[in-house]
Amino acid sequence: MAQLTYDAALVIAFPGMLADTGSRNDVLSRISEEAVSFPAGVALVAGTLPDTQALLPTGAASLLGVALHSHANEVGGDDLNLIDDASAFNVLHVGRVYVQVEEAVTPASTVFVRVVAGGGGTQLGAFRASADTASALAATGARYLTSAGIAGFAVLEIDAGAAIA
């Protein structure tokens, strides 16, 4: 079947897409310890077995990294590429990755990570520029390299030793 329509302006990225293939990237392999699926491009912390498992953040902790997108993941009927519970996936521990932000950010913005999910479909581990009434904590060792509007894509750089505090 022929493609009959196409977008004139494609989006710049998708959540969890590597921003570059630099030699500085440090990618870890982990297994989701979550009981539910979650999207790529969110912040993660070490799980119960820190050398093999990862969890979404629910408070102050060392930042393991950002869940990376993989074309190997099955895309569901809702066209979401989710990381399923108990499945293996990659985490960018050091490097640059595209993240979808909850609110507008600039390179001058402090990186905040959502640690309390609230109403309106907020996602644990999502990135933003404010604490959102104590629902998000600042991330040290991470910074925005580009600007993005609400629900836009920003390049996030994460360094070893990053933390959510």
Image (cartoon, rainbow, N blue to C red):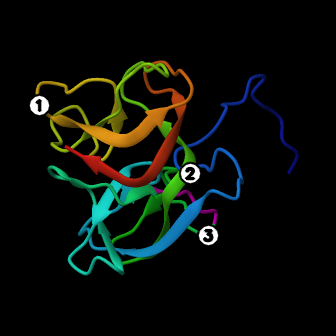
On the image, the x and y values in percent for residue 118 come to 15, 37
- As for residue 23 lying within the magenta part, the answer is no
Q: Secondary structure at mark 2?
A: strand
On the image, the x and y values in percent for residue 164 come to 24, 46
Looking at the rendered image, the disc whose residue lies closer to the viewer, 2 or 3, is 2
**Disc 2 designates what residue?**
95
Identify the magenta region.
67-71
Precedes in sequence: disc 1 or disc 3: 3
Mark seen at residue 72: 3
Residue 74 in view in this figure: no
Mark seen at residue 134: 1
Dominant secondary structure of the magenta stretch? loop
In this rendering, position of residue 132 left or right of residue 16:
left
Q: Give the residue displayed 16% in from the left and 34% down from the top.
A: 119
Q: Amino acid at mark 1?
A: Ala
Q: Secondary structure at mark 3?
A: loop
